[in-house]
Image: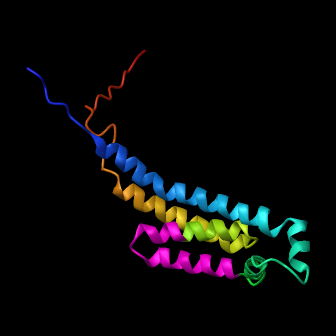
Amino acid sequence: MRRPSIRRPSIRIGRWRMARPWLVLLLVGFAAAGLRYGLIEPGTMEQLCSGTHSPLWCSGRQLLVLGFLHDVYGDLALAAAAWALVGKRPWTACLAAALGVFALELYCFQAGALALLIGCLRLLRWQTQALPRLPPAGQHRQREQHVQSQP
């Protein structure tokens, strides 16, 4: 007689669900690095956009530069971090961490670092609360603590 197979896909799905916010943070970090090192920092981009006949995308580059000059990214990251502290959803923590990574990459170091820290800690808190509760390892062991008077 054939035994029915026991399927446990929820463990794998649960792990991927837990990893999704961290993968989003990686993607945001790579995208922000691409913007910084590909569009903002190269001297050729600055020369190309400073001319009178600059391409259309130079206005977007200019907005990015004005954003970090006026600490817009840091302020947005801090607002998202405050929202993550009072919010009750995990996506607010992921948003705070993602905006923190973006702000860190685009020159708003202090505010970005604080938002990234708050977002990551809140996200870890929610993820540990979602894990199943397991008893401590020594809780159900027999207590055999014999003291020998002589060796």
Q: Which is nearer the eye, 53 or 63?
A: 53
State the residue at coordinates (86%, 65%).
Answer: 42
Left or right of residue 125: residue 46: right
Q: Quadrant of the N terminus?
A: top left
State the residue at coordinates (76%, 71%).
Answer: 107
Q: Is residue 86 magenta?
A: yes
State the residue at coordinates (28%, 32%).
Answer: 143
Q: Quadrant of residue 62?
A: bottom right
Q: Which is nearer the eye, 129 or 101?
A: 101
Residue farthest along the top direction in this orientation: 151
Q: Is residue 135 visible?
A: no
Left or right of residue 47: residue 25: left
Span of residues in magenta: 72-95
Compared to residue 9, the image places residue 129 above or below, namely below
Left or right of residue 119: residue 86: left
Compared to residue 117, the image places residue 65 above or below, namely below
Q: Where's residue 73, x and y in %?
A: 67, 77
Q: Where's residue 109, x and y in %?
A: 73, 70
Q: Which is nearer the eye, 14 or 61?
A: 61
Q: Where's residue 92, x and y in %?
A: 47, 72
Q: Is residue 83 magenta?
A: yes
Q: Is residue 79 visible?
A: yes
Most common SS among magenta residues: helix
